[in-house]
Image (cartoon, helix red, strand yellow):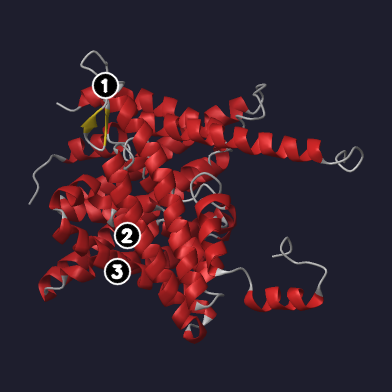
């Protein structure tokens, strides 16, 4: 059992070891959906939700796999859990709030291939977090992901209006921005005692 | 394929029947459709494990094995998989190979397994593998799919080595662990850190953009006047 305090887990997952800017997890949506502030916020929200649900589900699945003594199925089981969680969440949102469902659109199914989701499941297992720790860890990771996405979207919206050489425009420019953001987040490293 | 067709109808038919040769599939993934520099897929492992050339090489090889094996398997079973559940089936096939590779690496070198950490397991959600499965292996025969997987993997490994090499030389003053400079060289630690990954990849992308643009300009300049201006 791991005895890190809940607050430490949250701050670490959200700021110090930010999933996007320090661990490079979820780069694809980070580069792909960060051109508008509004979509970035929605994507962050949806991902956080899936993170929390799939983290709790993976906790259960891991305990079950340990009980039957089949740890080699872990990866396959986790990915199946995540895919079905996303499917469930999609059905649930469609039923309860069609407006939100329309707003999220294609982003919802794409969360399955967001590596941050699988990484949360794997990390929490490796670090032997308890149920409450898993919950906080998933919320922290989601908050960190949303924060990075929103910051990036804000920067890119500003940059749209600037005269940038043609050669640099596109992915290269986005990556440079991400690098600068990542440098800024290194400042949080001092927080860990 | 259209580029290779000629005016001779017999040759044309042969080209259509055979499609591009397996070698073409290999070269395509390595250069023209390089997964990192051209299609910009699979960014997460690219950036995360490219802080040294050795890690980059190991990750590239592991991904190549998964790409080739899953490509061949998916291509072999493609006729029996209903299209509604194909994505789930592909993911499960990929996950099985990744599990196998992870255990193999653990047996082969525990140190390397530790250095790569969770990123070996995260090959499952590398979008380019599912991308190749969906775009190529589910529509083609086994041998081309295998070659396509190997080619894409080689392209990925090449890109990782480009990144890992630069980052290790600048950030640590070494290449594959061997010292390159005298003691007076002050390493740029930032290249080993996460932000260095973003900067290095941005620089490589710029370089390839530049090359492609220059090639394009040369091609337009080589054409006779009138046909080039559109």
Drawn side of residue A54 relative to residue A125, left or right: right
Packing grade of label 1 (10 A; few <14, some 14-19, many >=20) is: few
Mark 3 crowd level (few <14, some 14–19, many ≥20, 10 Å Cα): some
| Point 47% across, 47% down: residue | A28
What mark, if any, has residue A54 been given in the picture? 2
Which residue sits at x=23%, y=18%?
Answer: B182
Report helix, strand or loop for mark 1.
loop
Q: Give the Cα distance between marks 1 and 3.
A: 45 Å
Q: Are marks 3 and 2 in contact (CB under 8 Å)?
A: no
Tell me, for residue B181, which label it has, or none. Answer: 1
x then y, percent, for residue B121 = 28, 57
Kindly give the residue lying farthest to the right in the view shown: B226
B14 up-or-down from B154: above or below: below
Chain of the residue on which disc 3 is drawn: A
Q: Which residue is mark 3?
A: A76
- Crowding at dot 2, Cα within 10 Å, few <14 / some 14-19 / many 20+, comes out as many
Left or right: A93, with B166 as reference point? right
Q: Residue at x 41, y 35 (%)?
A: A147
Against B74, residue B131 (above or below) is above
Q: Residue furthest bottom?
A: B80
């Amino acid at each position: 059992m791991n005895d890190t305090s809940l607050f430490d887990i949250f701050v670490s997952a959200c700021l110090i070891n930010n999933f996007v800017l320090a661990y490079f997890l979820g780069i694809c949506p980070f580069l792909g959906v960060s051109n508008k502030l509004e979509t970035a916020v929605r994507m962050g929200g949806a991902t956080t939700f899936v993170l929390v649900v799939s983290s709790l589900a993976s906790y259960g699945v891991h305990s079950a796999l340990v009980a039957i003594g089949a740890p080699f199925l872990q990866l396959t089981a986790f990915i199946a859990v995540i895919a079905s969680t996303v499917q469930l969440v999609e059905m649930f949102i469609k039923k309860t709030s069609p407006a939100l469902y329309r707003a999220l659109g294609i982003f919802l199914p794409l969360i399955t291939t967001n590596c941050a989701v699988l990484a949360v499941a794997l990390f929490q297992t490796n670090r032997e977090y308890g149920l409450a720790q898993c919950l906080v860890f998933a919320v922290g990771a989601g908050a960190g992901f949303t924060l990075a996405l929103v910051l990036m979207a804000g920067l890119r919206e500003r940059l749209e209006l600037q005269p940038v050489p043609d050669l640099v425009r596109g992915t290269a420019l986005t990556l440079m921005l991400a690098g600068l953001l990542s440098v800024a987040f290194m400042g949080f490293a001092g927080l860990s005692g | 394929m259209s580029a290779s067709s000629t005016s001779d109808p017999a040759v044309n038919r042969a080209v259509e029947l055979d499609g591009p040769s397996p070698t073409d599939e290999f070269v395509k993934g390595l250069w023209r459709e390089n997964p990192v520099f051209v299609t910009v897929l699979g960014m997460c492992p690219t950036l995360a494990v490219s802080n040294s050339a050795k890690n980059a090489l190991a990750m590239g090889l592991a991904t190549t094995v998964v790409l080739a094996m899953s490509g061949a398997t998916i291509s072999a079973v493609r006729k029996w998989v209903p299209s509604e559940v194909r994505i789930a089936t592909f993911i499960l096939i990929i996950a099985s190979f990744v599990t196998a590779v992870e255990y193999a690496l653990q047996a082969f070198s525990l140190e390397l397994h530790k250095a790569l950490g969770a990123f070996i397991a995260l090959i499952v959600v590398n979008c380019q593998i599912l991308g190749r499965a969906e775009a190529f292996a589910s529509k083609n025969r086994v041998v081309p799919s295998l070659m396509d997987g190997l080619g894409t993997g080689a392209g990925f490994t090449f890109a990782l080595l480009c990144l890992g090499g630069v980052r290790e030389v600048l950030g640590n003053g070494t290449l594959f662990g061997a010292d390159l400079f005298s003691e007076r060289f002050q390493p740029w630690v930032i290249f080993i850190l996460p932000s260095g990954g973003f900067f290095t990849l941005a620089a490589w992308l710029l370089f390839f953009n530049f090359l492609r643009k220059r090639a394009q300009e040369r091609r337009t300049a080589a054409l006779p006047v009138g046909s080039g201006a559109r």
